[in-house]
Amino acid sequence: MCHPGWHRARIAAQHLNDLARLRRVRDRIDREYRQPLDVEALARDVGMPAGQLSREFRLAYGRSLYAYLTVRRIAHATALLRLGGLDAAEAWSAVGCASPGIFAARFAELTGGPPAAPRRRATATATATATAKGTAKGTATGTLPSQPKPPGGPVRNREAPASEPHLA
Amino acid sequence: MDITIHTSFLPHDDPDASLAFYRDVLGFEVRSDVGTGTMRWITVGPVGQPGTSILLAPPAADPGITEEERRTITQMMAKGTYGWILLATRDLDGTFEKLQAGDAEVVQEPTRQPYGIRDCAFRDPAGNLVRIQEVG
């Protein structure tokens, strides 16, 4: 006889195990954010079908793999613009955005302004404050400072091959 | 006022696995170990610094936490968005190599951040983010 409580416990344990695999995928995206998104490789790495990975990642983290990568790239680019002394073209190139047009559009959507804006707005004092806060925030969550706000709508994966619609 | 930061807390979901990570991989000493099963409170800390400890504790042991909150906490731990701690060392590269050799889950290789510091990051067995920065 299988007690219903055991069944529930087994499902809960499996869910936690799946979440731990998603965590490894997310950490890998954080680590390799300059690389093009390769959902098949990410899925292989954690032994999960690509479609399941895409679905479960969105459920767990509230956005698609590609949207998550984009948020990460914009956060890194914003830090480079504000603190790294780079201009917009250098920043988008440094974070792995293939096209300056796409980068500018996503940057504006996520931060509410053009790529050059953060540095223009920053005074010496503001930059110093941002640096201090950025360090605290960056260390707190493993993210870079100036985390952009979440995207308002779905983000299409323009890096995905057209033949694999589930990748977005 | 003379206040020190004495003990910080990190949750565990497998006390033996967390103990092995902090004692055997990070090289911390064990200062106390109370409780049984999953309800264990283990105090660890760096050798030679008795005034600073980490308490590895069961999450959501507080009886005021609801079943739903308990579930949320364990899910956040698993997906890596709950616990984190910031450590520092003079020898970042040596520390990174030692942790990597100890099979710790690498999050980030030693990297110079745009905001100035150089750091690396790991996950402990409970999914907590352990970020280690280089200090002079």
Image (cartoon, grey):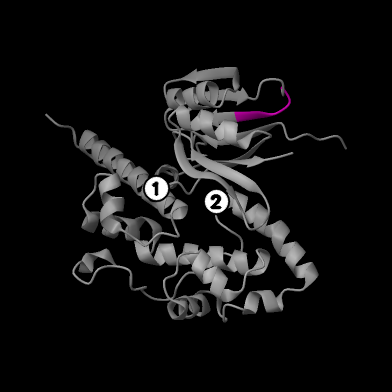
Q: Secondary structure at mark 2?
A: loop
Q: Quadrant of the N terminus of chain B?
A: top right
Residue B42: give x, y in percent of width and height.
Answer: 55, 23
Residue holding disc 1: A23
Residue B101: give x, y in percent of width and height.
Answer: 46, 28
Name the one closer to the observer, A22 or A159. A159
Specify the amino acid type for callout 2: Gly
Q: Residue at x 27, y 40 (%)?
A: A14
Specify the amino acid type for callout 1: Arg
A152 relative to B38, above or below: below
| Residue A148 visible, this angle | no
Q: Chain of mark 2?
A: A
Q: Residue at x 54, y 18 (%)?
A: B34
Residue holding disc 2: A142
A30 relative to B34, above or below: below
Name the one closer to the observer, A9 or A116. A116
B125 relative to B121, above or below: above
Magenta stretch holds residue B53: yes
Magenta-tinted stretch: B50-54
CA neighbours of label 1 inside 10 A, class few (<14), some (14 to 19), many (20+): many
Direction from residue B132 to residue A13 in the image, left or right: left
| Residue A164 visible, this angle | yes
CA neighbours of label 2 inside 10 A, class few (<14), some (14 to 19), many (20+): many
Looking at marks 2 and 1 on the same chain, the residue that comes earlier in the sequence is marked by 1
Q: Residue at x 33, y 61 (%)?
A: A58
Residue B37: give x, y in percent of width and height.
Answer: 42, 21
Direction from residue B11 to residue A54 in the image, left or right: left
Q: Quadrant of the C terminus of chain B?
A: top right
Name the one closer to the observer, A7 or A39. A39
Quarter assignment of residue B133: top right
Q: Chain of mark 1?
A: A
